């Protein structure tokens, strides 16, 4: 079986796969950045005591977390084109392109998950810390900025690491709507060479390497973040001891 493994084909395919890899990384990075920008305010509002505010956010997250991402992608790429209002709008030059439809679908999906992660992290902030902040006269905005969000970040970060890995791996769906990402390029080469074994193994190993690199980067950032916070805690203890 391994004697038939075409190493030369893999070497010849690497430049094309590298071009697809660039698209995969673009989709991943833009989805993560766009998702974070939208998720933070929505995650805060998700815990609002006002049902008129948290209700629509809950419905949005419930829909996008409860349906397959592939269906969401197809609804955006194929479904929106059925409406004349969409085809006649200024958004049509973007929505007729698979790349932008993928970016929209991936972002809407990750926002739904990230909002719930953020909201859950905020709900798990120790009540004693919040009461202490209010007792010294902090306003609601100051409590949110200086107490709630920093503590919630430590709770949020490990779970969000898994979400980023999920986004990275889900970008392979882009190949189903004509986007030549890493998986899309691999499929094109397979159609030309009839060698799925070599190409899919190579593509899988590239995704595996990307996943490992993503986890390593997040671990380093998390270690730096905790070290920074431990430094502040140490200074705080020294101040208390001096008093």
Image (tube, rainbow, N blue to C red):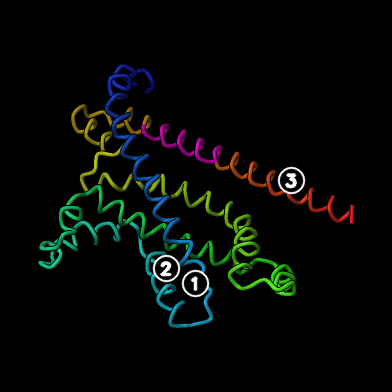
Q: Nearer the viewer, mark 2 or mark 1?
A: 1
The stretch drawn in magenta includes residue 212 = yes
- The residue labelled by disc 2 is 61
Question: Is disc 2 surrounded by few (<14), some (14 to 19) or many (20+) residues within 10 Å?
Answer: many
Quarter placement of the N terminus: top left
Which is nearer the N-term, disc 2 or disc 1?
A: 1
Q: Cα distance, mark 2 to mark 1?
A: 10 Å
Callout 2–callout 1 Cβ contact below 8 Å:
yes
Foreground of the two, 89 or 70 = 89
Q: Nearer the viewer, mark 1 or mark 3?
A: 3
Which is nearer the N-term, disc 1 or disc 3?
A: 1
Question: Is disc 3 surrounded by few (<14), some (14 to 19) or many (20+) residues within 10 Å?
Answer: few
Q: Cα distance, mark 3 to mark 2?
A: 37 Å
Looking at the image, which residue is at 89% across and 57% down? 243
Which span is picked out in magenta?
A: 203-217
Looking at the image, which residue is at 64% across and 41% down? 224
What SS does tag 1 mark? loop
Q: Which mark is residue 46?
A: 1
- The residue labelled by disc 3 is 231
Q: Nearer the viewer, mark 3 or mark 2?
A: 3
Residue at the far bottom: name it: 51
């Amino acid at each position: 079986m391994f004697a038939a493994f075409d190493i030369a084909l893999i070497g010849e395919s690497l430049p094309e796969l590298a071009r697809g890899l660039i698209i995969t990384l673009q989709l991943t990075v833009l989805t993560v950045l766009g998702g974070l920008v939208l998720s933070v305010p929505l995650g805060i509002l998700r815990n609002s005591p006002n049902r008129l505010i948290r209700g629509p956010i809950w419905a949005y997250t419930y829909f996008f977390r409860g349906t397959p991402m592939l269906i969401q992608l197809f609804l955006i790429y194929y479904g929106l084109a059925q409406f004349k209002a969409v085809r006649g709008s200024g958004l049509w030059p973007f929505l007729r392109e698979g790349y932008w439809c993928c970016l929209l679908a991936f972002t809407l999906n990750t926002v739904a998950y990230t909002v719930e992660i953020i909201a859950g992290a905020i709900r798990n902030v120790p009540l004693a810390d919040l009461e202490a902040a209010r007792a010294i006269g902090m306003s609601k905005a100051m409590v949110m900025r200086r107490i709630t969000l920093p503590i919630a970040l430590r709770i949020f970060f490990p779970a969000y690491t898994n979400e980023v890995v999920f986004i990275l791996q889900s970008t392979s769906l882009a190949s189903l709507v004509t986007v030549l990402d890493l998986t899309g390029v691999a499929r094109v080469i397979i159609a030309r060479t009839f060698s799925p074994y070599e190409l899919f193994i190579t593509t899988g190993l590239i995704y595996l390497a990307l996943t490992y690199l993503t986890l390593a980067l997040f671990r380093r950032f998390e270690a730096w973040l905790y070290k920074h916070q431990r430094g502040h805690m140490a200074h705080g203890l020294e101040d208390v001891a001096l008093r």
